[in-house]
Structures are given as C-alpha cells and as structure tokens.
Image (cartoon, rainbow, N blue to C red):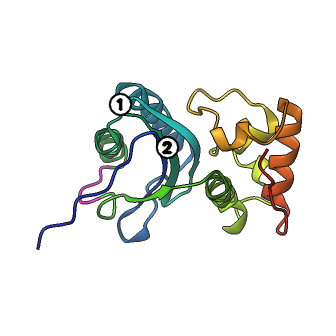
Amino acid sequence: MARPNRIIPTEAAMHIMCRGNNKLPVFVNDLDKRQYYYLLCEFKLDNKIDILHYCFMNNHIHLIVWLRQNSNLPRLVQQTSVAYYYHYKRKYDYSGHLWQGRYKSKIIDSDSYALQCGKYIELNPVRAGITDRPEQYQFSSYGYYVLGKQDPLVTPSPAYEGLGPDILTKRRIYADFVVNVNETVHLK
C-alpha cells in the first residue's frame, strides 16, 4: 500500500520531528550536533525555509519551520538527513539506517499552538534530565528567544514577535511562559 501524500501548506508553520532508528542516538557528542546545525543552516537557505524553533536531542530532533510558496520541505529534510548520515557513517564506521522512517510533521494552525509547540521543544532537555533549566542547553533556540544569543539558524517566530512592544518584554513573557507550568500567554 502506498504512503499517503504529506500535506505541506504554504505561508504556515509546521512542527517537524526526526528520530534515530530504533530510538538510538544519532548524536554521539556536541560536535555531531554542531555538524547537523551547520547542515541545517546551509540547506535552509537553498530550500527557502525559515527555522523558528529547534532542539537537537541525542536521539531525535525537533524543528518548527515556516514555509513559503517556494519552500521545499521534503528536500530540506532529505538533504540534511543524507548529508548528516554520510558524516556519521565516516566518523563512526557505521552502516545501516540512521533515521527511523519518514520524518513526522504537524501543521501549526495558530499563534497559541506555535508558542505551546516552541515551549514543548525547548523544554525537551529539562524533561529528559539533561539540564535543570532550558537556558543551560546550547542546542536549542531558547537562548535566542530569551537570552538574545545570536543564532543564524533562527528566524524570529511571528507568534513570539506578537508577545510585546519591545525585545525585553518579549523575552520576559516568553521565559515566564516556558518555565512556569501554569503560565499562559495572552497574545496582543
């Protein structure tokens, strides 16, 4: 039976997730995560895709991407996955499947859902027990949004941009929203 075609909208955001085969680690160390980061930086431009949020865990990655009329999401995922596979294969003398099946995707249809999804992604390292606070994890977009770190991979999320009149207000509101379990965000 053929797989159903993936629905890929335009002028919309999507949550993308890729997992290591059999849930095994695809990133052995921070250098591997940096390699994947650099590949995404390169290929996002070629495929006209903005990355709004990201987090690289040891055995999977999360992205929130913004798609335009001329974006090519399948090509971005394929190029990044294949290029990273060859890096991994050479470095670790690996053979076999690195990634588990097709990437998963979900359309993000509202600003509130975009913020909730960003929160979920950026709290992954905390839930996994890797760090106590999201700002301690360097392979996520949280540092860009809350600490103002330069990050060429990230394009500011429209939902984040709507949180307040200035950057300090946006950072404070978003930080409170992410780290406080009961916090809700009221969009302007």
Q: Residue furthest left?
A: 1
Q: Earlier in the sequence, mark 2 or mark 1?
A: 1
Instruction: Write down the residue under mark 1.
Output: 47
* Quadrant including the C terminus: top right
Q: Is residue 149 above or below residue 131?
A: above
Q: Residue 5 at x, y = what percent?
A: 23, 59
In terms of secondary structure, where does tag 2 sit?
strand
Q: Residue at x 76, y 53 (%)?
A: 134
Q: Residue at x 83, y 31 (%)?
A: 167
Q: Would you call the spot at circle 1 few (<14 residues within 10 Å), some (14-19), or many (20 or more)?
A: some
Q: Is residue 39 above or below residue 21?
A: above
- Residue 96: say if magenta: yes
Q: Would you call the spot at circle 2 few (<14 residues within 10 Å), some (14-19), or many (20 or more)?
A: many
Q: Is residue 52 above or below residue 179?
A: above
Which of the 4 image quarters holds residue 52?
A: top right
In terms of secondary structure, where does tag 1 sit?
loop
> In the picture provided, is 135 more to the left or to the right than 82?
right
Instruction: Write down the residue under mark 2.
Output: 65
Q: CA distance from mark 2 to mark 1?
A: 11 Å
Amino acid, disc 2? Val
**Magenta span: helix, strand or loop, mainly?**
loop
Amino acid, disc 1? Asn
> In the picture provided, is 104 more to the left or to the right than 177?
left
Q: Residue at x 36, y 46 (%)?
A: 88
* Quadrant including the N terminus: bottom left
Question: What residue span does the magenta drawing correspond to?
Answer: 93-97
Q: Residue 8 at x, y = what percent?
A: 34, 50
